[in-house]
Image: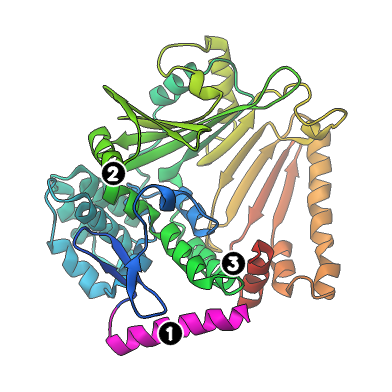
Amino acid sequence: MRRVLFVCCISILVAVAHAQETATLRLDLQGRLLRLDPAGEFVAVFADGLEDLRRGESLMGWALALDPGPSLAASSDCGWFFERLGEDREELLAGLDRLPSPAAPHAQRARFAMRVAALEGLGGAVAESAFEELEGSDDRSIRLAATEALARQRGEPSARGLEENAFVALVRECPSLPHAVAVVEHPRLPRPDALRRTLRRIDAARAGLSDDPVRALAELDRAAFYGYEVERRFGPARIDATVILVWLSGRTGRGALRASMLGEFDLDSIEQGLVADGVEHEREGDLLRLEIDGAWTLRVQPDRCTLDDEVMALTPLGGTLLGDRDLERVQASLADCADHPIRAAYLHIPAGAFGPGLQFGNLLPFSIGLTPGWTDQSPCRADLHFAREAAATVVEGQLRSLVRALDPLVDDDVLPPSVLDQAERVEIVRDGARLRLTVPFQEPDDELVDALAALRGG
């Protein structure tokens, strides 16, 4: 019955859009997104306040974290955004002639950066000269979007990245040596276009299993265009790197977490947006602070945005708390996988972190490097470095056993055959205490999409 209801909703949307010769997204005078609902009415994608800016259950939200876009808005699903607005390639190109001024509303400037990102996604179909003319823009975010688009078309590395001084300053503020650290250098990530298509299909199939498919589809739109809405309300923002520091709970103390996004943030615009949404906050010079759900503290500075749990919120920002030797340990742990844009390492595990008598920690790699890949030509690569060769051997055996265990599940029709086909394409190579996994990406067939949607639940 749920599947029938979902199909009916989609059919109505398609029929109404075709009959009215209109797109399934519109913009109001303030640049707010409106989506076509099954009744043929355009309703707001995002409600006022911060409630709709929380990451919901939609998988599409994860694509935002894996996008290398030069701004939050450009990290939205830009191609789908303009497709839903009804713009084809020619209209996308024509829009480059309508360059907004730096004083234009946030929404207008955000959409222009998204237009550049959408055109860049077309690859060689767009001449480099279209982007070169934008490099002289007075708007920093548009200038950067054009520069990034040109670099990708030419196969050149991004000029953005993790600034060593910023990273050192961040680690210096730690009250003690973290147990684990992870870093994501966003500009070095590949465009996740194929991933977005896959997640979009899974979310849409999952909506068909939901008690409320209309709400589920609305959540998909919010996840896909989240970055645009944030910049529409709070001004331009850029994230060059994300650094996550973790203190595990053990017999000697409680756990803690700090996640910092390094980049560029406009505090005045952010404060104006918070005031407009009626959100309580504190502003003191170049530091803006607000509480989230009583358990998290968000602190925004011009060059970073820091999210602390209730333990880390008591640690002041700025100053030097961590010593030179511990800082060197953190840097050395990440240097082991420096050729990957996503790196994680644990420096030590506190007693009791995984429960009494559990030796799971012995099988943990002390460093992990990950390079996502969304095509057969650029597969996903993961490098795991263990403290001992014996641990690498055990994990290698477990991974190979996992692949073999899929056979009976496919034979019993628990999993579609494409799962086994994909698993058998995974290459596992061990070199001493190191493991390398190479996973070619293949967009799933409809059978696998339905199976993944069912796993997610209704």
Q: Quadrant of the C terminus?
A: bottom right
- Kindly report the distance in space between the C-alpha atoms of the residues bearing marks 1 and 3: 31 Å
Decide which of tag 2 and tag 3 comes sooner along the chain.
2
Q: Is residue 321 above or below residue 85?
A: above
Residue positioned 69% across, 23% down in the render: 348
Q: Badge 3 is on which residue?
A: 442
Q: Residues within 10 Å of mark 2 (few under 14, many from 20)?
A: many
Instruction: Examine the image and state in which quarter residue 276 appears.
Output: top left
Find out whether residue 20 is within the magenta segment.
yes
Residue 306 as seen in the image, left or right of residue 247? left
Q: Is residue 83 visible?
A: no
State the image coordinates of residue 421 (x, y, percent, origin top left): 71, 69
Q: Nearer the viewer, residue 18 or 143?
A: 18
Residue drawn at (57%, 72%) of the image: 205
Question: 110 above or below 315?
Answer: below
The type of residue carrying mark 3 is: Gln
Q: Which mark is residue 12?
A: 1
Residue nearer the viewer, 146 or 195: 195
Q: Residues within 10 Å of mark 3 (few under 14, many from 20)?
A: some
Quarter of the image containing the N terminus? bottom right
The residue identified by callout 2 is: 234
- The answer to which quarter of the image holds residue 236 is top left
* Disc 2 element: helix
Q: Which residues are drawn in magenta?
A: 1-22
Q: Which mark is residue 72?
A: none
Identify the mark nearer the N-term, 1 or 3.
Answer: 1
Left/right of residue 165 with respect to residue 145 in the rendered view: right
Mark nearer the viewer, 2 or 3: 2
